[in-house]
Image (spheres, helix red, strand yellow):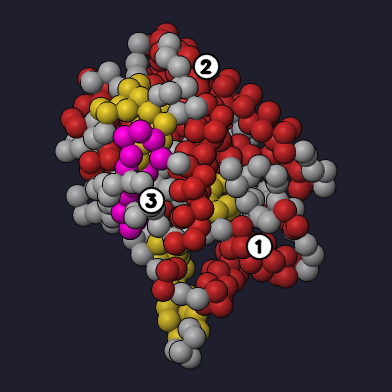
């Protein structure tokens, strides 16, 4: 996997480059452009945690609220050694566009703590999470900024944040986070939402390009929540052959298709996909270069660079991860006529069902899983159609079309609201 902190790649600069392209297409006036481009608020905290050996360790955490013109900030909190403020800025801006492109009334936010959760036990993770949450109490809230799970954070992490926030407020506030366990206000269908939403867009792309998913091949980079769910649904519901998957420890490849249910059980048991029975080992770059109908980058940023892009042999790329393709690589893929399902569309299922969860918490009325999935399908299909129409009308690629649609919606919200005072 590529490092989040690769010195040759700045995710914030990449996010700004794509934004500027969309702003140019829209001919945004300078005042509106700058208002949208830069984050409204940024918080960096350095906080102590007592570790299991009794020593005090300092951690650095960030929370960025990019834009709240369309509603409260919304976005995950990640735990990773490579977390930087620029990365969190980029992710927060992507959340603004993601919420706008699928038409839900949120703005963009994001957070992260620079740490290695794989080296920490549950007590240390809880102590760190609760201390970080206590630093955020005045910054987040159900009507202000609503965190969710992200890289190496889970529903349990959200439960700790929700409880910490609630203790400070003196009453239970389930709507302060989404992606919680069902027992304390979570939504059915939330854990599968990112992968499921991605699959809905893949199905729509296949219809547009006039090929059938049944019997077609797919390779999936990253086998965490989004990647594993996408693999499961593409195989079980659409008859696709998943020929390769990988995670941070290695990859598994079978040209005739992997047994996905058995692979999921193997991953659950061993914590890896490498070594799965009936598969060959495959490196990350080789997986990305496989000939297949659908490639799903579902790991971290900066996965597909200008060095990898010329080797891509997929017909469709569905970005289940945030920012997996650099701007330089994007240009190469467009020239190769690869049909791109950009991240702010393809992986918006997670924030869409987070919105559903927030609504359910606010009304204390919870939906059946079928209702969640049906509503998610409607949102993803409608959003795909709107992005495709924008691309065709303006004669631009799908990524730029998604950004043009999203940036225009945010700009219009700012115009309508005006400037205070």
Q: Which residue is mark 3?
A: 277
Q: Which residue is mark 2?
A: 385
- Relative horizontal placement of residue 53, taking residue 421 as reference (left or right): left
The label nearer to you, 3 versus 1, is: 3
Report how many numbered discs are placed on residues in the image.
3
Q: Is residue 269 above or below residue 276?
A: below
Crowdedness near tag 2: few (<14), some (14–19) or many (≥20) residues, C-alpha within 10 Å: some
Q: Position of residue 307 (x, y in %)?
A: 16, 38
- From mark 2 to mark 3, how far is it between C-alphas? 40 Å
Q: Is residue 215 above or below residue 352?
A: above
Residue range (magenta): 245-258
Say whether residue 29 is visible: no
Residue drawn at x 48%, y 83% as measured from the top left: 51
Residue drawn at x 50%, y 80% as measured from the top left: 49
**Does the CB distance between marks 3 and 1 fall below 8 Å?**
no
Q: Secondary structure at mark 2?
A: helix
- From mark 3 to mark 1, how far is it between C-alphas? 36 Å
The label nearer to you, 2 versus 3, is: 3
Give the residue furthest to the front.
278
- From mark 1 to mark 2, how far is it between C-alphas? 36 Å
Q: Which residue is mark 1?
A: 159
Q: Quadrant of residue 85?
A: bottom left
């Amino acid at each position: 996997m590529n490092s989040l902190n690769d010195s040759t790649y700045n995710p914030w600069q990449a996010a700004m480059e794509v934004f500027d392209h969309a702003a140019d297409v829209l001919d945004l006036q300078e005042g509106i452009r700058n208002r949208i481009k830069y984050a409204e608020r940024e918080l960096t905290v350095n906080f102590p945690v007592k570790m299991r050996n009794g020593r005090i360790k300092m951690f650095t955490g960030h929370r960025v609220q990019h834009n709240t013109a369309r509603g409260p900030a919304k976005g995950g909190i990640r735990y990773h050694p490579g977390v930087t403020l620029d990365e969190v800025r980029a992710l927060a801006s992507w959340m603004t566009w993601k919420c706008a492109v699928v038409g839900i009334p949120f703005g963009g936010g994001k957070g992260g703590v620079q740490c290695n959760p794989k080296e920490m036990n549950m007590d240390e993770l809880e102590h760190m999470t609760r201390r970080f949450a206590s630093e955020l109490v005045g910054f987040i809230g159900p009507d202000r900024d609503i965190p969710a799970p992200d890289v190496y954070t889970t529903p349990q992490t959200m439960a700790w944040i929700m409880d910490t926030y609630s203790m400070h407020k003196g009453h239970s506030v389930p709507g302060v986070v989404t992606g919680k366990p069902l027992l304390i206000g979570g939504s059915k269908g939330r854990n599968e939402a990112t992968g499921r939403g991605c699959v809905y867009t893949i199905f729509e792309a296949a219809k547009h390009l006039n090929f059938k998913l049944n019997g077609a091949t797919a390779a999936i980079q990253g086998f965490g929540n989004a990647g594993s769910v996408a693999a499961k649904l593409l195989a079980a519901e659409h008859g696709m052959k998943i020929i390769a998957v990988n995670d941070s420890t290695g990859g598994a490849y079978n040209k005739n298709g992997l047994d996905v249910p058995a692979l999921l059980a193997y991953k659950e048991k061993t914590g890896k996909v490498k070594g799965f029975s009936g598969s060959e080992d495959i490196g990350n770059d080789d997986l990305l270069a496989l000939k297949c109908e659908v490639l799903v980058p579902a790991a971290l940023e900066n996965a597909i660079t200008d060095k990898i892009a010329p080797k891509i042999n997929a017909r469709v790329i569905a970005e289940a991860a945030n920012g997996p393709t650099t701007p330089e690589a994007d240009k190469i893929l467009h020239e190769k006529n690869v049909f791109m399902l950009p991240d702010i569309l393809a992986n918006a299922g997670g924030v869409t069902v987070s919105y559903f969860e927030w609504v359910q918490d606010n009304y204390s009325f919870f939906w059946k899983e079928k209702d969640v999935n049906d509503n998610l399908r409607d949102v993803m299909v409608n959003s795909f159609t709107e992005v495709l129409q924008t691309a065709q009308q303006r004669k631009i690629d799908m990524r730029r079309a998604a950004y043009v649609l999203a940036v225009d919606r945010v700009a219009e919200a700012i115009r309508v609201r005006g400037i205070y005072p």
